[in-house]
Amino acid sequence: MTDDEAKAVAAGHRWSGWPGAWCLDCGADDPYEIALADGRIDDDPDTGLPVITEELRAQLAPLMVCKEPGSKRHDPYARAALLENRDGQ
């Protein structure tokens, strides 16, 4: 793992789940999922596994850093719990 990748993991997103993942804190879409959908990630013809080039990895690394770590602003589950506690239910 490169230093940039380690930093991204340290300040990483909390994904909602796949497919269609968004960050539960900042609301960003998963850049790797987008790259897969738009054809920037191909499958290895021998193994069938996705191939992520170093160039693509370098392009996506800055997008893997969450701009609002821990905010839970886009987490529907956290919002529901906050509303429930606020309303005394």
Image (tube, rainbow, N blue to C red):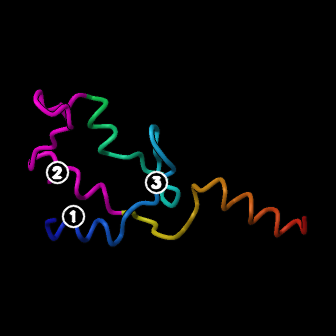
Name which of mark 3 and mark 1 comes first in the sequence: 1
Nearer to us in this view, 73 or 35? 35
Count of numbered labels shown in the rendering: 3
Work out whether 51 lies above or below 5: above
> Is residue 61 part of the magenta span, yes or no?
yes
Residue 62 location (% of width, % of height): 25, 58
**Dividing the image into 4 quarters, which one contains the C terminus?**
bottom right
Which quadrant would residue 12 be assigned to in this image?
bottom left
Which quadrant would residue 66 be assigned to in this image?
bottom left
**In whole angstroms, how far apart are the C-alphas of marks 3 and 1?**
16 Å
Please name the residue that numbered disc 1 is placed on: 5
Residue 13 location (% of width, % of height): 41, 60
**Dividing the image into 4 quarters, which one contains the N terminus?**
bottom left
Question: In the drawing, what numbered circle is on residue 57?
Answer: 2
Question: Callout 3: helix, strand or loop?
Answer: loop
Name which of mark 1 and mark 2 comes first in the sequence: 1
Which portion, as a residue range, is magenta? 39-65
On the picture, is 32 further left or further right than 41? right
Work out whether 64 lies above or below 53: below
> Is residue 19 part of the magenta span, yes or no?
no
- Mark 1 touches mark 2? (CB < 8 Å): yes
Please name the residue that numbered disc 3 is placed on: 15
Q: Residues within 10 Å of mark 1 (few under 14, many from 20)?
A: some
Which quadrant would residue 33 be assigned to in this image?
top left
Q: Residues within 10 Å of mark 2 (few under 14, many from 20)?
A: few
Q: The disc labelled 3 sits on which kind of residue? A: Trp
Work out whether 21 lies above or below 67: above
Residue 71 location (% of width, % of height): 54, 68
Q: The disc labelled 1 sits on which kind of residue? A: Glu
